[in-house]
Amino acid sequence: MSVDSDDKTSRMEKIISTCNEVLRRDPKNWAAYHDMGVAYMELGRFREAAAAFERGHDLNRRDTEGLYLAGVAWAELKEYDRAISRWREVLKQDPRHVSAHFFLGKVYALKGMWDPAIHELKKAVELDPEARPPLAYIHLAEVYLARGLLDQAVRALERARDLAPGDARVRLNLGAAYLDLRRYEEALAESREAIRLGTTNPAAHLNAGIALVRLGRVTEAVDVYRQGLALKDDDPDLYLNLGEAYLVAGRLQEAVEAWGRVLELRPGSAHARHNLGVAYFRQGRLEEAVTEWKKTLEADPDHIAARVNLAGVHAARSDYDAAISVYRPLLDKYGKNAEIVAGLAELFLRKGDVAQAVDHGRQAVIADPGSPRALLILGLALARRQDAREALDTLRKAAGRHEGFLESQAPTLRACLDDVSLRALEREAEETRQDEDLALVATLRSIRRAQGQAPAPQGG
């Protein structure tokens, strides 16, 4: 304990002793109880503080400040319902008590009561819009973020920034909110300002790096992450994102080393282990990649990309039963996701189980009628079933969703559209003589003739 701390403790204990002496002479002296409560608060003896404040308020019902402080003491003890009742009583006596509104909002937020929290914090802002530090705006933004109301959170944080431009925490939080809104230039600017202002929170470097990656400035992102690690060399999130930047830059061995460091710091990180598998795959170390993806699923059985990548390895080896076995559990959790269901339909189609492919393809389209991927797989399955007319209609819808979509799906088209099915589509198009059908079939034939590479594993 420091000398200053000893001196403070001595002074507070002397005040308490003096108040007790006053109360022995005058048991109804409410001011002595109030002062005693303040001293107990300074010493961190919150239960005794609450009792003193409440006794003082019992003796003087106009002592709203004592009742307010009693609420603060109960909140420090995490007895939030008691705190709420005291502050609500304060507001009955003084509806313009800014601090009571603020702390009510703060405690409602701690209890997950978002709407009352927003109401009280907005009331605090309304009563004192220029308060510094702008704590009401900061907490209001946190509640908006918890509710997923990003635009409102940004407006609150922008107001807080205007009131306290030198507050690094506000800059940090605003940068994070801009990042969530994909406003990357602004996210970068605010994160860098938080760093300039001296924040010790590594999230500032993390957010700046993520924004730089999104802006395509990967080399700068690597530098920012490394600057963050120079300040805090055991932050797994910085290493995780540093590895992703290295991967984008093609610096595979450095990505492997970064993710290895994550696993030293956070052994259960499924994300890092999966990404390590991706780096191994791109280095041509296939068996090591498979091992990492299997370990990923041991840590997180719901990891989508690891299952997709493992299934892809099995499919590349024509072991479709193994691919389907690895992939199928995704449907238990993501059965309403059109992309997931379409992926299983594709595996059935590659296996040659056309009936299952059509069934799951239709399920995927039902889940999202506008999904080009779901429409593509269903169209290919219908073509394999020799339902040429419906197949053409479905494939035309898939192609019309995005320009160049069919070309982007070349590996799937080459694997799933055989010569027999393509000739059936061609005959149907020639019979109808519809320009769209003829052009579609020509595109499909062109894609199948072109040479392509196997799809890269999914990152993330």
Image (tube, helix red, strand yellow):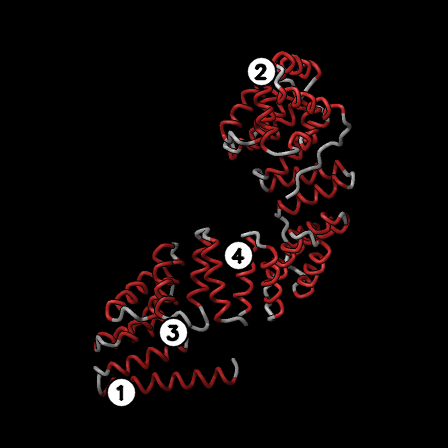
Label 3 close to label 2 by CB (< 8 Å):
no
Specify which label sits upstream in the sequence, 2 or 1. 1
Within 10 Å of the Cα at label 1, are there few (<14), some (14-19), or many (20+) other Cα atoms?
A: some
SS for callout 3: loop
Indicate the quadrant where residue 358 lies: top right
SS for callout 4: helix
Identify the disc placed on residue 22. 1
Q: 39 or 244: nearer the eye?
A: 244
Specify which label sits upstream in the sequence, 4 or 3. 3
Q: CA distance from mark 2 to mark 1?
A: 97 Å
Within 10 Å of the Cα at label 3, are there few (<14), some (14-19), or many (20+) other Cα atoms?
A: some
Q: Which residue is mark 2?
A: 389
Q: Which residue is mark 4?
A: 177
Residue 458 located left or right of residue 333: right
Specify which label sits upstream in the sequence, 1 or 4. 1
Mark 4: amino acid: Ala
